[in-house]
């Protein structure tokens, strides 16, 4: 049962909730919700589900692959500004407006009579201004594709309202997260082409690696350590949002007692299994950054980092007699860091080195099927998404020694698939 709150309870006992993800990660986020006892419905760009305040809090605290968690305040037809304003006034705005700070409305309009996003935002802002606390600042923003950009500076208490109008059907949502969920708080130091934490977690969850069973894991090109750190957080059962704040904490309906209870349970659920997680990189500066990030994440003692070449890191691997080990890494694609022709030797080295190790499998995030084919390994796509605007896929190998499959190839749209 939720604990009593000193603030007035929300009159809404059930909410329509949506967890946006990067394209292609919907099924992984749905699996995460299932592990929390929540049955979600996959939609393009995320997972929809129902719940009370408890579920909003839990989703923000535990989801590793979602971009944010939003509450759908209303869905209605709006082909005129009059309809938009009239129906918007019926939404429960006071429940989602901070007592101080600002409100930002971001709008996307597609194939609708209301096509001017700034004009739509101004109408919705005028409705909110009528019920917002005095002194609240109102802003119009542009909602970036795939929720890729930050919108809030720490401590700004800015409530984001998202308006989407498609085929004259309007949906208005209130963000409950604040900073995007990939911002766990530990990655203060980054290297070149950093991998977003949510995408690193998706690689781990989709690969089949199970750290709870003590399966070894190596990222031989770990950069600032995102994959090994996320692996340790998953293996130990550490909630990704344990050390950060969320926008829902500034709602009038925020239940501090309930939130404290959830946090206490999350801390009590942390385990201390014996882990074999290694991060290697030839850049000594990146390794120092990775070590500092791991300490901030609370897993400094769970990951071993070393300044090693690619072949040197793999040479130190021992054969796995029981179970299997995983190499999970995000090598250069030949787009942001280097040119494809300069990277063929790197991919070939990775494949050749792995063939000498028994019981090891590999997962790589790449956008280039030609480079992936240089590994000469059986690779199957696990998901396709975007990393920094670049189409990428996670390709995972079959067990070493299994019959070779034809190498993957690029299909229409730039994603990777089987030939």
Image (cartoon, helix red, strand yellow):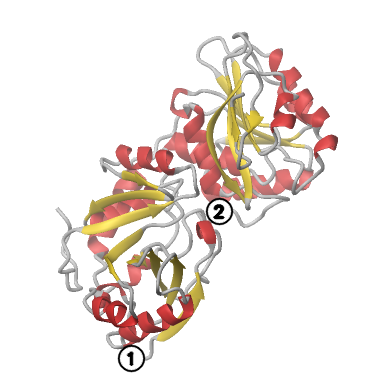
Category of crowding for the residue at label 1, using alpha-carbon neighbours closer than 10 angstroms: few (below 14), some (14–19), many (at least 20): few
Q: Is residue 122 left or right of residue 91?
A: right
Q: Nearer the viewer, mark 1 or mark 2?
A: 1
Q: Residue furthest bottom?
A: 134
Q: In this picture, is 259 found above or below 225?
A: below
Q: Is residue 142 left or right of residue 120?
A: right
Separation (CA) of disc 1 from disc 2 = 36 Å
User: Dot 1: what SS?
Assistant: loop
| Location of mark 1 (residue) | 134
**Nearest the camera: 102 or 141?**
141
| Location of mark 2 (residue) | 186
Category of crowding for the residue at label 2, using alpha-carbon neighbours closer than 10 angstroms: few (below 14), some (14–19), many (at least 20): some
Q: Is residue 343 left or right of residue 93?
A: right
Residue 370 image point, x, y percent: 74, 30
Quarter location, residue 356: top right
Residue 207 appears anywhere in the view: yes
**Nearest the camera: 101 or 207?**
207
């Amino acid at each position: 049962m939720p604990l009593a709150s000193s603030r007035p309870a929300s009159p809404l006992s059930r909410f329509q909730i949506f967890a946006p993800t990067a394209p292609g990660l919907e099924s992984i986020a749905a699996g995460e919700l299932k592990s929390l006892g929540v049955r979600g419905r996959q939609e393009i760009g995320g997972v929809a589900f129902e719940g009370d305040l408890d579920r909003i809090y839990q989703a923000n605290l535990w989801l590793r692959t979602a971009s944010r968690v939003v509450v759908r305040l209303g869905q209605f037809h709006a082909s005129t500004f009059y309809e938009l304003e009239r129906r918007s006034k019926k939404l429960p705005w006071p429940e989602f407006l901070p007592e101080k700070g600002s409100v930002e409305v971001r709008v996307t309009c597609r194939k609708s009579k209301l096509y001017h996003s700034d004009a739509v935002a101004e109408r919705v802002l005028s409705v909110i201004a009528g019920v917002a606390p005095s002194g609240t600042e109102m802003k119009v923003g542009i909602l970036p594709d795939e929720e890729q950009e930050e919108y809030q500076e720490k401590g700004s208490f800015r409530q984001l309202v998202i308006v989407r109008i498609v085929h004259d059907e309007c949906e208005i949502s209130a963000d409950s997260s604040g900073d995007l969920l990939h911002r766990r708080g530990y990655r203060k130091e980054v290297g070149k082409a950093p991998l977003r934490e949510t995408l690193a977690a998706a690689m781990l969850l989709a690969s089949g690696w199970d750290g709870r069973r003590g399966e070894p894991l190596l990222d031989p090109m770990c950069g600032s350590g995102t994959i090994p750190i996320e692996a340790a957080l998953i293996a130990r059962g550490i909630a990704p949002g344990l050390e950060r704040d969320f926008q829902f904490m500034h709602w009038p309906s925020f239940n501090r007692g309930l939130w404290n209870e959830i946090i206490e349970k999350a801390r009590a659920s942390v385990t201390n299994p014996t882990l074999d997680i290694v991060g290697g990189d030839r850049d000594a500066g990146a390794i120092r950054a990775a070590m500092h990030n791991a300490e901030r994440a609370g897993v400094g003692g769970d990951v071993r980092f070393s300044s090693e070449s690619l072949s040197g890191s793999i040479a130190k691997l021992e054969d796995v007699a029981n179970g299997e080990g995983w190499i999970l890494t995000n090598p250069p694609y030949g787009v942001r860091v280097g040119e494809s022709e300069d990277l063929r030797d790197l991919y070939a080295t990775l494949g050749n080195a792995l063939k000498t190790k028994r019981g090891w499998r590999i997962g790589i995030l790449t956008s280039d099927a030609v480079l992936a084919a240089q590994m000469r390994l059986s690779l199957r796509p696990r998901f396709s998404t975007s990393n920094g605007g670049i189409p990428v896929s996670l390709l995972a190998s079959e067990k070493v020694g299994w019959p070779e499959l034809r190498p993957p190839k690029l299909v229409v749209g730039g994603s990777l698939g089987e030939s």
